[in-house]
Image (spheres, coloured by chain):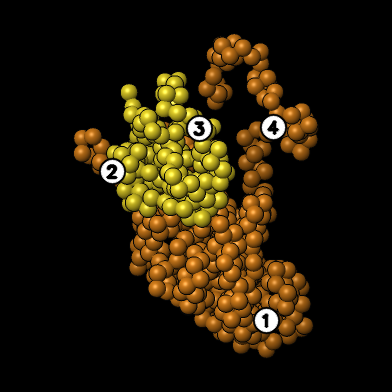
Amino acid sequence: MSNVPQELRYTQSHEWVLAGDDGQVTVGITDHAQELLGDMVFIELPEMGAELDAGDECTVVESVKAASDVYAPVAGTVVAVNEKLVDAPELINEDPYGDGWMFRLQIADPSQLDSLLDASAYEVVESED
Amino acid sequence: MPFIPHTEEETRKMLDAIGVSNIDELFDEIPADLINERLDYVPPAMDEAGIRRLCKNSAQSDGHYVNFIGAGAYEHHIPAAVWQVATRGEFYSAYTPYQAEASQGTLQLLYEYQTMMASLTAMEVSNASLYEGASALAEAVLMSVRAQRKKHRILMPETINPAYRETTETIVKNQGITISNIDYSGDTGTIDLVQLNDQFTDDVAALVIPQPNYFGALEQVDELVDLAHKQGCLVIAVVNPLSLAILKAPGEWGENGADIVVGEGQPLGIPLSSGGPYFGFMCCTQKIVRQMPGRLIGRTLDAEGKQGFTLTLQAREQHIRRSKATSNICTNQGLMVTAATLYMSLMGPAGMAQAAKASHANTRLLVEKLTAIDGVEVVFNSPFFHECVLRIDTPMDDLVRAITAQGIIAGMPLGADYEGLQDCLLVCATELRTEEEMNDFALHLERIVSKG
């Protein structure tokens, strides 16, 4: 069983979202997603300052098995990207909820967070995979 | 026995299994108005003797001319062993195999080809080839836009082969990419650096640099590369691979070298054969390899520690990445690449340099002989590789027709593609042209020009 931290929000497409007090959210992919994809070999991060709508493709991760898109869970502006992943994409496998974070958004509409899944709802999504 | 892998019975079984009554039903999803019912232009079936006759007649209608035309395809010496080996059953396929790793010999050959091309261009990576030179440039343009994200403008000099520009425009125009033309200097026949300088705006993804350019002239590649890189643009080099045996490799242009190198592979052992098949090549830096289209072969070790060859970075390709793949190209011109690899192996660096130098020397000699004629002069004041533009004081169509009647193809008239060059002819003399042939050409040209 993969790790699904209680304090995070989730999407159907396997992103996790950590909401901060400053109107910013941090985004990555779940433990389950990294397990499915396998060893990461490459990441293409979003551009700083890019304005994203919820559901926009903004990051590409490539593993030994596949290349997949990562979607913006909510609308917002990219205010930080995890440059460490460019040289060390394996961090996504090793620590998906920590050092494996991908980007941070200044969110446009905090109410969009309410439409995300909580941990128990995401566990259901996982079990149906 | 027909060469069809499935018997009627097997086909029936498969159709029954999926609940379809006949093969045509598999295509039901195609809207009826898109289906062309009438195929009147397809001639009736022919027998083997008929096909031989048709091909022989077509080949004969090409004629046997002494060639002084280049303009993108060049008649060079091809060692007899190249096609003797390339047409062996083990190699005789245009495709990378679908069960790729089962064909280690083919993969090894492609790996060796890539290694040779990377070494020739001084680039880090080569793919296993593309269709031909013009579409290779279009792919390079798409690749540069992917690598540069929000930038969508390409600076394309007038000195590029006009067919390459047209092909590129056709392929990229509906993808939101703008092609801006860069003028050439009427004095040198190369990219006008002053005019170019004004063209760098924030949205320029790449500058295309042909070397030698369509006029045969050598561009100031070092200055151009540094200028483009200073402006945050990528550089796409379009080169003649044979010329690289004696010219500076694009990976060494300027401070940091070109980012993408493409071109037509035909000069490397592929016969003219009425215009194809040829092959395109593409090399790039490691930094942007994930944006590169086409197949890449890598060398690795298997579970037993033995050397093996494998398709690598497949996640970019369409069988995995579907509509987001780096291109729709999943195959290549394998047979042409086989011939090119054999050509480069047999000629070696010294042999290729010899062919390139002899082509350069022959073209100089030809230009000397032709410009000795009153009314014939060199147009551009630039060093050239093996082609040169001549201005001839005689109506061009008549001239070309009259020379052709003497069994000589005089060159490529430039009037149709370049305003102001109506009276200009692009000539080429590869290592195959003899002094006698050049004298013959000069003799006929002199006779025609003096009459005009």
Q: Which colour is chain B painted?
A: orange
Give the structural element (helix, strand or loop) at label 3. loop
Residue B159 found in image quarter: bottom right
Q: How far apart are labels 2 and 4 at the CA level?
A: 48 Å
Q: Is residue A43 left or right of residue B415?
A: left
For badge 4, the amino acid type reads Ala
- Cβ atoms at labels 3 and 4 below 8 Å apart: no
Q: Residue at x 55, y 76 (%)?
A: B217
Give the spatial CA distance, label 3 vs label 2. Answer: 44 Å
User: Which residue, as the protein is rendered here, is positioned at the far front?
Assistant: A21
Mark 3 and mark 4: Cα distance apart in space = 63 Å
Q: Which chain is yellow?
A: A
Q: Is residue B264 above or below residue A33?
A: below
Which amino acid type is marked by label 3? Leu
> How far apart are the alpha carbons under marks 1 and 3?
72 Å
Q: Which mark is residue B45?
A: 4
Mark identifier at residue A116: 3
The subunit letter for the residue under badge 4 reads B
Secondary structure under badge 4? loop
For mark 1, name the chain. B
Q: Are marks 3 and 4 on the same chain?
A: no
Q: Position of residue A120 (x, y in %)?
A: 42, 23
> Does mark 4 fall on the same chain as mark 1?
yes
Asked which secondary structure carries label 1, the reply is strand
Residue under numbered circle 2: B300
Pinpoint residue A67: horizontal percent, then vertical percent: 44, 39
**Pair 3/2: label in front:** 3
